[in-house]
Amino acid sequence: MSAYAAPLKDMRFVLNELAGLGSVAKLPGYGEATPDTVDAILEEAAKFASEVLDPLNYSGDEEGSRWRDGQVATPKGFKDAYRKYTEGGWAALPFDAEWGGQGLPKLVGTAVEEMLTSANMSFSLCPLLTQGAIHALELAGSEALKQMYLEKMVAGQWTGTMNLTEPQAGSDLALVRTKAQPAGDHYLISGQKIFITYGEHDMAENIVHLVLARTPDAPEGVKGISLFVVPKFLPKPDGTPGERNRARCASIEHKLGIHASPTAVMVFEDAVGYLVGELNRGLSYMFVMMNAARFSVGLEGVSIAERAFQRALAYAKERLQGKDLVQGGKTVPIIRHPDVRRMLMLMKSQTEAARALAYVVAASMDVSSRSEDPGEKKKHQAFVDLMIPVVKGWSTETGIEVASLGVQVHGGMGFIEETGAAQHLRDARITTIYEGTTGIQAGDLVGRKIAREGGATVKEWMGHLRKFDSELAASRNSDIQSLRAHLAAAVRAVGECVDYVLATAGKDPNAALAGAVPFLKLMGITAGGWQLARAALISESKLAGSEGDAAFYKAKIATARFFGDHVLAQAGGLAATVTGGAAAVMALSEDQFLAA
Ligand SMILES: Cc1cc2nc3c(=O)[nH]c(=O)nc-3n(C[C@H](O)[C@H](O)[C@H](O)COP(=O)(O)OP(=O)(O)OC[C@H]3O[C@@H](n4cnc5c(N)ncnc54)[C@H](O)[C@@H]3O)c2cc1C
């Protein structure tokens, strides 16, 4: 079984040439992100990912986490790996120095997060959820809560969870029923939460649950939901874990994938909880944090795609079947067959496109949070808001497609667990579901991010792409010219869809939403194509100046061209579906779906 090797060459190219790490490092507070430091971090993270986490990925999947009498044992090796993770300072990487963090840009944290997730997605979920809980406390927690929890969580000594979902409240959190009864300086929390990632485990000394609940006189719906901290062990005044709180794990789920990540049913029976921020504003705090969490899940799509691609490539070079169509002769490795190459190129080009888009969005997150220029801040925040549902929805759908192609490249062996290809497909499958399904992302894109603001940000982005077309026009490379034509057609297709959304969203929301997912895909391939086109232009100029690794730059141009011919070429069809397909979506009555 092939081992994971972090794609450092592509990561460095994307960080420096596309996402502008140099400018990000000049933002206030990011002085630590010097080229040497970032390089050392990438090297060390790559080592940690392939030497510590990757070897536990397959065994962790086979063994799974196990529940017994309310306790959860993670698979062999996970506890030790988590100790190494915290001792290595990885947990603290993207957080403020005030709480013991290393204060590095989101952009650098993104590259590290990709590596850890590629190597072992189940493991990476514990830090992902902890980061979400830290953001919630940073955003809205009182000084006392911050003092009590943040340092331990940033260090990774205590982990965090997000307790949103209940049996009747999934996508629709307005239906949350968990109760919070006031009791002096705290609340007593009662109710059941399901699907809670790392709700119980044995890797850290305490677990800090962030729980959505309602106080007795709270208004109905989303306006009556508050956020509470409910620790597994109530901290003593000296900050060490004390008495066990009445929050217990009733069971963990048997799932399609991410077997090593425990997905807990949590029962709260008058558990002590502390209000975070103001009463009834829980969901609005969640929405602010969701950008970070949705981004991270989008990055899971990139990570799994990269891992699946590496495995398929290794297999394609080693598996011997059939003859070379032109040369004949001996049996050849399957990578010689055009269809296998097509699949590998689909895997490679879509992974690189999704990575580039995610890193560029991460850089904008840094600018929007740290720039001292209010105009810049606002512009980058608007771009981030527009692109988050695209990064989440498109990268995860792409991750599943790439993992599925990985199985196909392996042939029958892909369907057999021992190659590891099937695990990637099973693990990837959850990414389009949690943190808001693709349908929810697409609805957010069409409704809140486009229709609500009259398409202002998306139109500005399209204007930027049209200007970029003149840069592409100056290229003398025929591959880049071919890509340019596909990108221009995709931008026109986006424009048609935006006009359609703006015309229909107000008077016929069903018509606007019926094609929201194909529209999200169109946005994803256009944004990904834009990044690959930028990569191709930069590569052309590097080659002209005889700078750096010629083979890498030539491959970049060829990969970008492939993406144009095979992926961007779908843009017109997607636009036709969005603008013309709504009536048929809504045509059947509910009884007509199954003709009895
Ligand atoms: C492994 C795993 C880990 C998880 N981890 C956590 C966690 O740590 N914390 C937590 O709180 N939750 C967690 N979840 C829950 C997860 O976020 C929910 O499953 C998800 O939000 C979807 O909710 P649901 O399962 O109730 O599906 P439903 O909301 O019932 O959705 C079913 C289908 O209907 C569609 N749908 C529903 N409403 C709409 C709408 N308004 N518009 C368009 N389509 C719609 C959905 O897209 C989906 O296709 C986890 C789930 C799993 C499986």
Image (cartoon, rainbow, N blue to C red):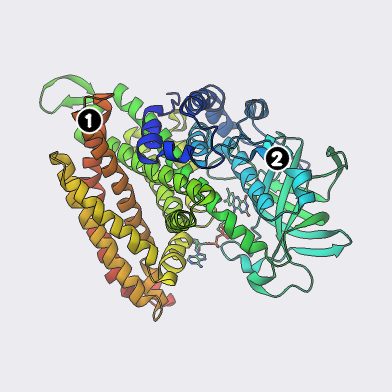
Q: Secondary structure at mark 1?
A: helix
Residue 396 in sight from this viewpoint: yes
Residue on which the image places disc 2:
153
Q: Residues within 10 Å of mark 2 (few under 14, many from 20)?
A: many
Place of residue 252 in the rendered image (x, y in percent of width and height, measured from the top left): 67, 46
Give the quarter of the image for residue 576.
bottom left
Q: Residue 463: x and y, percent?
A: 29, 59
Q: Residue at x 35, y 66 (%)?
A: 515
Residue closer to the observer: 116 or 278: 278
Specify the amino acid type for callout 2.
Answer: Met
Residue corresponding to mark 1: 554
Mark 1 residue type: Lys
Please report the residue visible at 41 percent of the width from the left and 45 percent of the height from the top.
360
Pick the quarter of the image with the N terminus: top left
Label of residue 341 in the image: none
Report the residue that reaches farthest toward the front: 373
Q: Nearer the viewer, residue 589 or 433?
A: 433
- Which image quarter holds the C terminus? bottom left
Residue 313 figure quarter: top left
Gap in Å between the C-alphas at discs 2 and 1? 44 Å
Which residue is located at x 19 percent, y 34 percent? 338
> Where in the figure is residue 396, as x and y percent of width and height?
44, 48
Q: Is residue 340 visible?
A: no
Element class at badge 2? helix
Q: Earlier in the sequence, mark 2 or mark 1?
A: 2
Report the residue that reaches farthest toward the left: 326
Image spot of residue 412 (x, y percent): 36, 34
Q: Specify the quarter for ligand 1.
A: bottom right
